[in-house]
Image: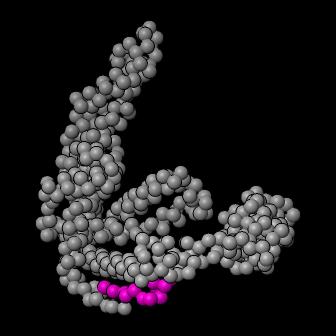
């Protein structure tokens, strides 16, 4: 391989001229012949025994060129990129300029590279941290939620349905007198006021009694996910089998013993206050860090290639697809259920992707300016943490994670710590 030239043709864009010598090309052709000869039938020869020259004479000298080129160009272009000392942010666009056995291969590769970055005044960033105190009302709300979780269901047979009751119903829906798919269920548990059904359905059950049969008239929303039903009036035939309501416990010392590890209500309240305080502190720290991150992005000076934003969006979608895959769902299914197009789904991630790319570039530059380094011990400790977190053998983690990438992540983290530690933070108590 010979890198003939590396020409900067635009901001963040280089054009590499790469030459593959005839002998390297010849070796690739021979490997291609050896891999494919058993697939080629030539009269007078047993399958796989026809000499290469005979095959080339029969099918043309270029018969193995395409496969040989496809084998060789990724390796040769990669070497050229390394020789030119370029840090790519996307796959290069490759064009084969000329091919011959006598002269080898001439390649043009257009490469998009990481932008040049400048950032100043990243120390001493001014920010505010809002410290919110826990109120008695918030503690009471949490106790009430605990009471809801520990409530028992009581069957009701002496009154009609009220808002908040849990009903067990049969229903079947009709549009223009015809039952529609998915509109029927038996012994279905529905909490009145939950908003589980389309608007107007649950309200019409209020006031009805056990064993009562009645019609519920509703209109499907215009934006309803099933297009054949959107905007159409429907009639549901409903029968009530059971009515239940929640019986809430008394919030006292006995409740504290039953619902927690504490013996008294005061101890439980103190524990709730501690946890709420910790949660608010974490929220405040996250908001502070976001302020600082936004300030860093404002100070960043760089012409960032669109490919970096697009690639980050693709990574975020891939991560999302992986997560829902563990729940037995595909991205295609998810988009169908939510009624969302792929382009709209991508747009949901664009703002966050843009912020992440800008912040990463800013912090990488800061780590460079500050001369931040990661020791071998620090790197090994981080590998061990990854192994422990994911319950994977250490050597397996080292095979899966590039140490250079991990070290860069750690540098970025240290850079953020530095910016946070040097920030001028004003605390506001509420």
Q: Which quadrant is the C terminus positioned in? A: bottom left
Q: Quadrant of residue 179?
A: bottom right
Q: Residue at x 43, y 67 (%)?
A: 350
Tell me the colour scheme of the image. Answer: one colour
Q: Is residue 192 left or right of residue 389?
A: right
In this view, 87 is above or below 59:
below
Asked whether 42 or 258 is in front, the reply is 258
Q: Residue at x 25, y 61 (%)?
A: 409
In this view, 399 is above or below 143:
above
Asked whether 343 or 129 is in front, the reply is 129
Q: Position of residue 180 (x, y in %)?
A: 79, 59
Q: Quadrant of residue 128?
A: bottom left
Q: Is residue 98 left or right of residue 322?
A: left
Q: Quadrant of residue 300?
A: bottom left
Q: Is residue 409 left or right of residue 188?
A: left
Q: Position of residue 262 (x, y in %)?
A: 41, 74
Residue 103: in sight, yes or no?
Answer: no
Q: Residue furthest right?
A: 177
- The stretch of residues the image draws in magenta is 129-141
Asked whether 136 or 393 is in front, the reply is 136
Q: Residue at x 43, y 10 (%)?
A: 46
Asked whether 271 or 55 is in front, the reply is 271
Q: Position of residue 308 (x, y in %)?
A: 35, 61
Q: Residue at x 22, y 62 (%)?
A: 410
Q: Position of residue 346 (x, y in %)?
A: 48, 63
Q: In the image, is residue 130 part of the stretch drawn in magenta?
A: yes
Q: Is residue 13 left or right of residue 266?
A: left
Q: In the image, is residue 61 part of the stretch drawn in magenta?
A: no
Residue 349: in sight, yes or no?
Answer: yes
In this view, 14 is above or below 108:
below
Q: Which quadrant is the N terminus positioned in? A: top left
In this view, 278 is above or below 414:
below
């Amino acid at each position: 391989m010979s890198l003939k030239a590396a020409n900067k043709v635009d901001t963040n864009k280089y054009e590499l001229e790469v030459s593959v010598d005839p002998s390297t090309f010849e070796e690739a052709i021979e490997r291609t012949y050896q891999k494919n000869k058993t697939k080629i039938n030539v009269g007078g020869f047993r399958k796989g025994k026809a000499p290469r020259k005979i095959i080339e004479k029969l099918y043309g000298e270029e018969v193995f060129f395409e496969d040989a080129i496809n084998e060789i160009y990724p390796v040769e272009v990669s070497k050229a990129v390394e020789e030119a000392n370029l840090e790519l942010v996307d796959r290069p666009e490759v064009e084969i300029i000329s091919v011959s056995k006598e002269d080898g291969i001439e390649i043009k590769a257009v490469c998009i590279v990481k932008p040049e970055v400048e950032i100043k005044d990243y120390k001493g960033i001014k920010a505010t941290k809002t410290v919110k105190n826990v109120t008695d009302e918030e503690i009471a709300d949490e106790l009430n939620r605990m009471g809801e979780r520990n409530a028992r269901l009581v069957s009701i047979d002496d009154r009609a349905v009220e808002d908040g009751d849990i009903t067990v119903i049969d229903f079947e829906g009709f549009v223009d007198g015809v039952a529609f798919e998915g509109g029927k269920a038996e012994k279905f548990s529905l909490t009145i006021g939950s908003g589980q059904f389309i608007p107007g359905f649950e309200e019409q059950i209020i006031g009805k009694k056990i064993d009562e049969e009645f019609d519920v008239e509703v209109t499907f929303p215009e934006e309803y996910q099933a297009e054949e039903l959107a905007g159409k009036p429907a009639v549901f035939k409903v029968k009530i089998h059971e009515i239940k309501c929640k019986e809430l416990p008394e919030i006292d010392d006995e409740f504290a013993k039953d619902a927690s590890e504490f013996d008294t209500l005061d101890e439980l309240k103190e524990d709730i206050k501690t946890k709420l305080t910790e949660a608010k502190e974490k929220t405040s720290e996250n908001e502070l860090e976001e302020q600082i991150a936004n300030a860093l992005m404002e100070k960043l000076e760089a012409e960032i290639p669109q490919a970096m934003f697009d690639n980050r969006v693709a990574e975020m979608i891939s991560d999302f697809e992986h997560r829902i895959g563990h729940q037995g769902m595909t991205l295609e299914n998810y988009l169908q259920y939510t009624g969302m197009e792929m382009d709209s789904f991508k747009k949901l991630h664009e703002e966050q992707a843009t912020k992440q790319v800008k912040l990463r570039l800013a912090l990488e530059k800061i780590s460079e300016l500050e001369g931040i380094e990661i020791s071998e011990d620090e790197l090994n400790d981080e590998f061990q943490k990854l192994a422990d977190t994911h319950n994977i053998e250490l050597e397996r983690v080292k095979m899966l994670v590039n140490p250079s990438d991990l070290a860069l992540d750690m540098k970025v983290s240290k850079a953020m710590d530095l910016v946070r530690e040097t920030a001028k933070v004003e605390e506001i108590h509420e």
